[in-house]
Image: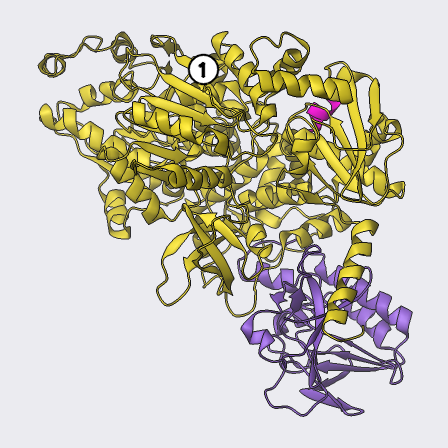
Amino acid sequence: MPEARLLCVSDLHLGKSERMARRGGALLPPYETEETLARLEAEVEALAPRCVVCLGDSFDDLGAALAMPEGVRLRLQAMQAGRRWVWIEGNHDPGPVELGGAHRSDLAVQGLVFRHIATQGCAPGEVSGHYHPKHRLPRSGTSRPAFVYDETRLILPAFGAYTGGLRCETPALRNLFAARAIAVLTGPRALAVPLA
Amino acid sequence: MAALPPRFREWFATHGWDPHPHQLEMLERAEEPATLLIAPTGGGKTLAGFLPSLVELADGAHDGLHTLYISPLKALASDIRRNLRRPVEDMGLPIRIEDRTGDTSATARKRQRADPPHILLTTPESLALLISYEDAPRIFAGLSRVVIDEIHALAESKRGDQLMLALSRLQALAPGLRRVGLSATVEDPPALARQLARHPDPCPVIMADPGPLPDIAMLDTAAPPPWAGGGAAHAIPEVLEQVRAHRTTLIFHNTRAQAEIFFHNLWLANADSLPIAIHHGSLARAQRQKVEDAMVAGELRAIVCTGTLDLGIDWGDVDLIIQIGGPKNVKRLVQRIGRANHRYNAPSKARLVPANRFEVLECRAALEAAAEHDLDGDPRGPGPRDVLCQHILIRACAGPFDEGELFHEVRTVGAYASLSRAAFDDCLEFCATGGYALRAYDRWQKLMKRDGLWGLRDPRAAQRIRMNIGTIQDTELLKVRMRGRGGQPLGEVEEAFAASLTEGDTFLIGGQIVRYEGLKEMTVQVSRSANKTPKIAVFGGTKFSASTRLTARILELIHGNWEDLPGTIRDWLSLQRDVSLLPRSDRLLVESFSHDSRAHTCLYGFAGRNAQQTLGLLVTRRMEELGLDPLGFVATDYATLIWGLEPVEDPAPLLAPQVLRDVLEGWLARNAVMKRTFRASATIAGLIERNLPQNRKSGRQATFSSDILYDTLLKYDPDHLLMRITREEAMKGLVDFGRVEEMLARVAGRIDHVTLDRVTPMAAPLLLEVGKVPVAGKGRERLAEEEAAALMAKAGLTG
């Protein structure tokens, strides 16, 4: 939102590898927090937003949030300095974290409502995450993370490094949208296509 | 022990048989720590392997497990169980024989662990699972012999490495264990013997009489093979004629897709309704079982099949092998031919059917090689470390272990005999902490050292490790079902193939044409289609590279005597010679032409499919740097065809060895082949878990692509163990850069560039090849933007 100078990112899933290891799962390369933060820092630097909204599932769970190493805290604090920072609660990370910024279940800004999971029958202007939408052009290449919108809502792709995607054709996702909906594929250039 | 006991002599006599010399020799050598038997199919190989066990068990004095039999196929294990029952029942031997595979019920498995049979028949994966149990020392305490069937097939893959590692564990649990390997013809028996034996034990090789020379020839067809394709539809009448003239025919294909198409065409022409079935790895298990049962019952006249029938299930009366398509590898051809005629003294009979004109050359070259018994094969390098990582995890499941003891155990495996302690420690470290430069998991280690012994930090991890045992890589497969409630399962297709389908597309599976309806809960939904011509089924099937020796022979043939070649091939070659040039072994032919408004360039390297594929990746990468906007390429065993938006005017700078090596360094890291190799190794080593305890697919896709892990490691930890393993694996496997180098050395910069205004006779077949590889770059981005804009315009929207 250029005029509000608001940057919104969704589903960072910081600390995902730590959570998997803690639960006795695979020991994934522990670099995804570094990678996700570096991407976020690049966006913040490029856009200089007045407000940053993290749209939920910012941390893979509360344990991951609590176990954030000092370096990560400092980098988050550096990004938060001089701007409004809002953590929206997600299903992975309900409740507040001790990392600065405001904690909200949702946030209304200039006619838009930011929340983690899209709600049925909401008023127009809803912005959410959660589903990690991805989409592919029928003939050109592999699927890419995608923004999906219609006249009522916008769903953001996941911003975190270790995040899978859900195909836009999946009923749980597709049924949230009207017949005429648009997917915007991320990549070297954003590509807008109508959803089937 | 040398002589056959009277009871056994009588048994042979009642059936009017004489024991084969190699069967008696196996009995004489029963006390050797390891023995390798090389015998043709039908030579009583299995009985030779089991005879010493039956003799040792005949007095009923042995308690518990005595002999372990390992086969690469589940079906083979149950087949052998049936066959062994005969001598055991005839002679009234007090021997309990059971099989144990992925299909064995949980109750039966539990009972087998508590009270093992005398002879247990199983697969490498089931054995790996067995040694992961804490009661493994009790189960295997009295184990005396292990018999590995079809060891030549296992030894070529990581399944063999895993098996040998498991044997090193068994040998520690049962020090007196003796090993027997049963093999078909191979090019280097002593090398196989070294893989089998405990290092450095000796391993005598027993060669059975190979029997009469096989009767092999090309099948004459009225219609010449087409310019391109793998369908061999031209040969249908003659193949049917052969099926009619023989009792039972196996019709081998190199890929599942080709088998499907051929089967479909065969039935369209099968006026007498001869009972002909299809069998390959993508079909639903029930379907395959039906075919196998019908075959055993002698109800089928022919089976259209793939490599899934390469191994020795006893099909009874097969009297003809037909190989459709180039055999790719002379050794495999010879082994396949050995599948015909299980009666020992009759010659095996085989007919080769080239599916296109290139393959005529390949078949001719293979026939000559087979006649000269010039078998090809690549020596296997040192034991792969991803398999070792899995072995360490399996060992940890069975209970605490000492690292020094495990290291010494592993070094008794032939393939790991020269493993360094440092390399072993790397693998152990990876299993314990992930082995990352960033020491992140000190608190959450998977393996921990307590009181000097390594063990699992969280014992619950054992379940996850056991669920992911194995080295067979199923590419992501999706089930195919008829639409509707309780729709009939038809088989599986690769995810990438499913993703390429849009509603209404038709493809072949299990011999029927189906229409793609959509993807529902990770299942491909289809309906019956009345269409006669399906969209080509591009799913499944391993693509082997033609061996170095075979491609060299083909080049010789192109430049040698054409007398034995059919007229159509001679015409084709002379046309190529007139229009362009003939490829030679000491020069590289490069052709450039425009086709379908795209610039095309064809490189005739004759380096095998994988190396030609790598060449395509490297050259297109260089083209991208030079602004030629390549869009894609396709590779065969003989050539690589590249297309793009701009023409190649001078190929020399694209093919300079140093340039290619530099591009390889920079690019190797980021290409799809590396990512595929990484996925395979990371899965075997336990970083990627294919199976999770909970339901695998919840509403939201829980897993993310292994490519992300690869990219992350490349950026933050490029020297990580798995990245090193991936590079090594890729160089010898899918990347096969060794053969690119070999080709470049052979041509030594002598490049013949021919520019034409039309497709050449030799390039034409490549235009029709499936398996085109898209190049992600500026060219494709240009086209994607155009496509997106067109779709928006069509929907009446403006971007």
Nearest the viewer among B213 and B13 is: B213
| Kind of residue at disc 1 | Ala
Disc 1 crowd rating (10 Å Cα; few below 14, some 14-19, many 20+) is: some
- Quarter of the view holding residue B655: top right
Q: Would you name the residue on which mark 1 appears? A: B217
Is residue A112 shown left or right of residue B95?
right
The chain in purple: A
Point 82% across, 35% down: residue = B663
Residue B85 visible in rendering: yes
Nearest the viewer among A143 and B352 is: B352
- The quarter of the rendered structure image containing the C terminus of chain B is bottom right
Reply above or below: B379 against A129.
above
Main secondary-structure element of the magenta-colored stretch:
helix
Tell me where residue B126 appears, x and y as whole percent.
37, 41
Tell me where residue B627 appears, x and y as whole percent.
89, 44
The chain in yellow: B
Q: Is B153 part of what is drawn in magenta? A: no
Point 42% across, 16% down: residue = B185
Tell me where residue B14 appears, x and y as whole percent.
9, 15
- Quarter of the view holding residue A82: bottom right
Is residue B322 shown left or right of residue B157?
left
Reply above or below: B783 against A78.
above
Q: Secondary structure at mark 1?
A: strand
Tell me where residue B782 appears, x and y as whole percent.
82, 55
Nearest the viewer among B218 and B108 is: B218
Q: Which residues are magenta?
A: B736-742
- The quarter of the rendered structure image containing the N terminus of chain B is top left
Point 27% across, 50% down: residue = B105
